Amino acid sequence: MKEILAATVDIIYEDGILALTHRAVAKRAGVAASAPSYFFPTIDALVVEAFRSIMASMFVEHESLSLRIISEDMDRETAVDAYIEMIAKTALKYDKLQFEAYLFAASKPELNAEVQTAVAMTWRRNNTIVTASRREDLGWAAPILTALADGFGLHRIALSNCEDGFHRLKEGLLALMESLPGHPSDWLAPDEVGGTQPR
């Protein structure tokens, strides 16, 4: 099944979700033509599981980095460098699958549930970017910091030459981490306005 999911991710990365077929996945994975549909009766089920597996891997990596930042008592710039180094390793494939899933989520209920869970994880008050800020009063801003990182992720997909994108992301994150207030009086966290519940 790992080969099937890996092939699914590769096809989405290269040609997008609309290019997925059971036959294309089987050929790419080097498995019997019936194998993908045996494990995943529908393409939607295949996309959901591929998204779930990638997000699970991503969050394990993020949690590991958060623990490193704390245990090594990294300063802010070192922590942000470590964050960017981590996402740069898998950015292209992760970005494409993540954002294609976001786009299709509105019309696919099962995928929508997974996307909501993923977004909630990125909005947690102790997410990796917040941890990298080295500020204990910045948990409220997790959605803002995440939105900046996601915006650069979209640019990496849209632009064929975005070599300085990670440098600009670093500058943007450091600027926000320095300038955002600790306790804004007019901001409601997502869970306070009935949106996705951070976990």
Image: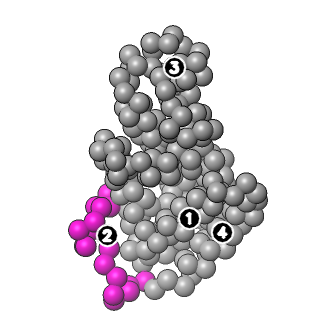
Residue type beneath disc 2:
Pro
Considering the numbered disc 1 on the image, is that residue within a helix, a strand or a loop?
Answer: helix
Task: Give whichever of 137, 18 is nearer the camera.
Answer: 18
Of badges 2 and 1, the one in the foreground is 1
* Residue linked to disc 3: 23
Residue 142, percent from left and from top: 43, 68
Tell whether 160 sits left or right of 121.
right
Mark 4 vs mark 3: which is more N-terminal?
3
Mark 4 vs mark 1: which is more N-terminal?
1
Name the magenta segment's main secondary structure.
Answer: loop
* Residue linked to disc 4: 170
Q: CA distance from mark 4 to mark 3?
A: 41 Å
Mark 2 vs mark 3: which is more N-terminal?
3
Q: From this view, report whether residue 183 is shown above or below residue 42.
A: below
**Mark 3 nearby-residue class (10 Å; few <14, some 14–19, many ≥20):** some
Q: From this view, report whether residue 30 is shown above or below residue 54.
A: above
Residue type beneath disc 1:
Gly
Report the residue at 53% width, 24% height from top.
25
* Residue linked to disc 1: 151
Considering the numbered disc 4 on the image, is that residue within a helix, a strand or a loop?
Answer: helix
Considering the numbered disc 2 on the image, is that residue within a helix, a strand or a loop?
Answer: helix
Q: Are marks 2 and 4 in contact (CB under 8 Å)?
A: no
Of badges 3 and 1, the one in the foreground is 3
Q: Which residues are magenta?
A: 182-199
* Residue linked to disc 2: 190
**Mark 1 nearby-residue class (10 Å; few <14, some 14–19, many ≥20):** few
**Mark 2 nearby-residue class (10 Å; few <14, some 14–19, many ≥20):** some
